[in-house]
Image (cartoon, rainbow, N blue to C red):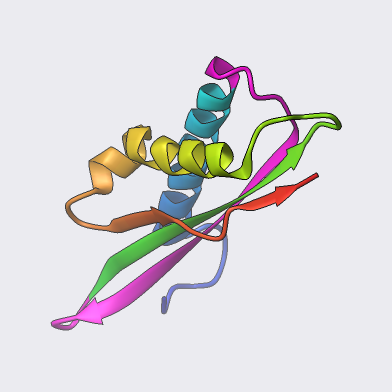
Amino acid sequence: MEGPGVGSNPEELLISAANNCYMITLGAMLGNRKIELEKLKVNSEGTVIREEGRLKFKQIIHKPVMYLKNGSEVTQKKLLEVAVRAEKACFISQTLRNNVEVSVERVEIVG
């Protein structure tokens, strides 16, 4: 982004904030539904474009990876539903909604 290349930049910090908010919201929603996971990871990517000579965030995509506990009977359909609902409930996603497209893609379920 033409900066000095040292430390975090504002774009990375925005993606990090969106990632953390989504992960916390997803974890809380899973907990409320008594869905226990062995581990939860969320990889998030952002796309920045140049529009009319200015840099602008176009989108942030969350890619959750859910590791099921052995013997879990939760369906993939239910996990996908919770993953998408968590993005809609996330405070940061709500704040960005009219300016940046935020979505969930490629939900991976292990176990």
Q: Nearer the viewer, residue 44 or 5?
A: 44
Q: Identify the residue shown where x is 64% and y is 24%.
A: 35
87 over 58 or under it: above or below: above
Q: In this view, does 89 lie to the left or right of 84?
A: left
Q: In this view, does 73 lie to the left or right of 50?
A: right
- Residue 24's x, y, as percent? 53, 30
Q: Identify the residue shown where x is 43% and y is 64%.
A: 46
- Residue 47's x, y, as percent? 39, 70
Q: Identify the residue shown where x is 53% and y is 23%.
A: 28
- The magenta segment is 31-54
Q: Identify the residue shown where x is 29% and y is 59%.
A: 101
- Residue 56's x, y, as percent? 26, 69
Asked if the stretch drawn in magenta spans residue 99, the answer is no
52 over 12 or under it: above or below: below
19 over 38 or under it: above or below: below
- Residue 76: quarter of image: top right
Asked if the stretch drawn in magenta spans residue 40, the answer is yes
Which quadrant of the rendered structure holds the N terminus? Answer: bottom left
- Residue 36: quarter of image: top right
